[in-house]
Amino acid sequence: MDNFDKIAVIGGGSWATAIVKMLCENNSTIGWYMRSIYAVEHIKRNKHNPNYLSSAELHPEQLDLSNDINEIVGKYDVLIFAVPSAFLNSELEKLNESLENKVIFSAIKGIVPETGLIVGEHFHQLYNISYENIGVIAGPCHAEEVAMERLSYLTIACQDEKKAKALSKKIKGRYIKTKVSDDIFGTEYSAMLKNIYAIAAGIAHGLGYGDNFQSVLMSNAIREMKRYIKKVHRMKRNINNSAYLGDLLVTGYSVFSRNRMFGNMIGKGYTVKSAMLEMNMVAEGYYATKSAYKINQENGAKTPIIDAVYEVLYEKKEAKDVFEKLTNMLD
């Protein structure tokens, strides 16, 4: 199979829109499933997504758009999933079409709440997809900068190097550089964890901590990430590569980071519900925090930052008190 001329994107948000934009640079036709029939019709008429990255010009003549997930899954061989992790399970429950023999790439940066699994593990365990047919699209890359065609870097990971290289070739372009990796577990876990650390950075900012503390927080975060990933999947990897450290830094520092924005609101005293309502976007790190904390109860890595974010978000402890305690645990 491995027909990388038949690629479809599943999802209608910012990252899905950015991936479609990248793919249109190198491909004649891209399948695109999004739930909203309004958005589908709007893109066909007006050449942009009405809800996300509306400044990004799209090319309807290259797009096979549908709000029927079965129609798209049935027609395309390579599927890039780019829906929020909290909604992945409900989207997959709509499927009548088989995923057998499909190549699945995850552009989702979170844990599936219903199973507590990263996306690759979810597809492998529940849909019997071979790990050879599962890949990950990792940053550091913000959708907003793709829309502005600012130079960005992506890591395409798959245990089958040929598949990683094939998708890499379809995505890279004038403003997108790519590299390949065989570390599907490490890249996906780091993509999940960096959102938690970005929330921590946001909380610290909201509490009034400055750049000096932020730098200490981030340097501790990458070491904590290394300990965590080593526990869940041991292999030789350089945690300082862009897919790990680079993605952490852009998510922890960027003004485009919704997880940092969410954390900033929590630090300023917002409740979780009010922060999410005001943002009108999903902060993946909120859901990831609970799953990462639970997984680590079994693995036992030293994770003071994850523990602190969990205490604030789920145990409803005062952020000021939790972070004062955290400052004494960092070095």
Image (tube, grey):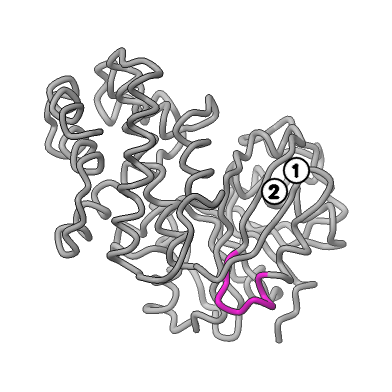
Which residue bears the numbered disc 1?
A: 43
Are dots 1 and 2 in contact, CB under 8 Å?
A: yes
Residue at (43%, 67%) from the top-left corner?
Answer: 185
Which residue bears the numbered disc 2?
A: 40
Real-space Cα separation, disc 1 to disc 2, in angstroms: 5 Å
Specify the amino acid type for callout 1: Ile
Given residues 203 and 273, the one toward you in this image is 203
Taking 118 as reference, is 293 left or right? Answer: left
- How many C-alpha atoms fall within 10 Å of the one at disc 1: few (<14), some, or many (≥20)? many
Q: Position of residue 285 (x, y in %)?
A: 36, 43
Judged from the image, the secondary structure of the residue bearing numbered disc 2 is: helix
Magenta residues, as a range?
157-164
Given residues 302 and 39, the one toward you in this image is 302
Q: Position of residue 68 (x, y in %)?
A: 61, 63
Residue at the far front in the pictured view = 331
Question: Number of labelled discs?
Answer: 2
Whether 177 is drawn above or below 198: the answer is: below
Judged from the image, the secondary structure of the residue bearing numbered disc 1 is: helix
Residue 69: in magenta span: no
Taking 72 as reference, is 131 left or right? Answer: left
Q: Position of residue 21 (x, y in %)?
A: 75, 47
Residue at (81%, 41%) from the top-left corner?
Answer: 45
Taking 137 as reference, is 217 left or right? Answer: left
Specify the amino acid type for callout 2: Val
Quarter where residue 76 is shown? bottom right
Whether 28 is drawn above or below 330: the answer is: below
Q: Position of residue 261 (x, y in %)?
A: 42, 26
Given residues 223 and 191, the one toward you in this image is 223
